[in-house]
Amino acid sequence: MTNAIAIRHVHFEDLGTLAPALAAAGFEVAYADVDSGVLADFDPLAPDLVVVLGGPLGVYQAEAYPFLADEIRILRQRIAAGRPTLGICLGSQLMATAMGAKVGPSGHSEIGFSKLALNDAGAASPLRHFAGVEVLHWHGDTFALPAGATLLASTDLCAHQAFTAGPNILALQFHPEPDAADLERWLIGYAGDLGGRDPREFRKAAAAYCPSLQRATATMLSEWLAGLKP
């Protein structure tokens, strides 16, 4: 059994459908909640895998939310050491920041389901399992591509949806992890993000798209985990 730590910002943005794939790959998973103070003494290199989850903050708010600086420090050391690291949404933005790239508001929000445009590198990576699959987007910030990173996917509203920096480093701006039940909590907790979007239509989309998203996520993650290097 190997250990994975999921850094969690809000309780309803958890590992979701990533959890069973991690368990199937032999990982024992624990959460490090940012409001618990554990990140100040967190050993960046100790976990076999770190997953940094999403949240409502921006990486540029570290003065107001000091745990963001702890996360950037942790990620900078892990990425430099090539330790297996996966970031989702805010997690991907924190990874980009740790690698020296600029992160900031995109000028618009991307919220809802849409397909990824995979480039050649993405089509040759585990992300190929998302080809033709409606994935979830829920963000207003975006990252520049870090030096030395390889872009994998884009959408019309966000040019940088995923990058890798070797087999052990994967950053996903989109959300692969929610199922339809999870998203009900998002519709409540992030109601202020919806603008004019009708939550009833969102529920219909989640019911239609989440089953195929869940299958693609499980296959993608299993393949990525199997390809990790010591």
Image: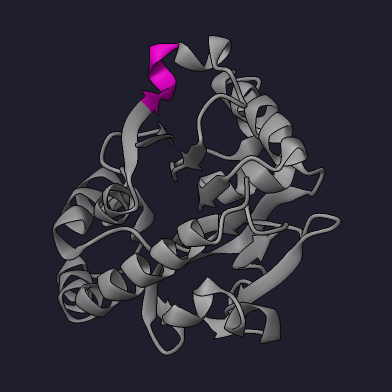
Residue 82 higher or lower than 115, as above or below: above
Q: Position of residue 61 (x, y in %)?
A: 62, 30
Residue 130 higher or lower than 104, as above or below: below
Residue 38 higher or lower than 49, as above or below: above
The magenta region covers 32-37
Asked if residue 47 can be seen in this view, the reply is yes
Position of the N terminus by quadrant: top left
Q: Position of residue 74 (x, y in %)?
A: 64, 27
Q: Residue at x 71, y 58 (%)?
A: 166
Q: How many marks?
A: 0
Q: Position of residue 87 (x, y in %)?
A: 53, 48
Asked if residue 137 can be seen in this view, the reply is no
Q: Residue at x 72, y 33 (%)?
A: 76
Quarter of image, res 75: top right
For residue 9, side relative to residue 170 (left or right): left
Q: Position of residue 171 (x, y in %)?
A: 59, 56
Residue 225 higher or lower than 42, as above or below: below
Name the residue nearer the viewer: 211 or 229.
229
Q: Residue at x 51, y 74 (%)?
A: 127
Name the residue nearer the viewer: 160 or 47.
47
Quarter of image, res 160: bottom right
Position of the C terminus by quadrant: top right
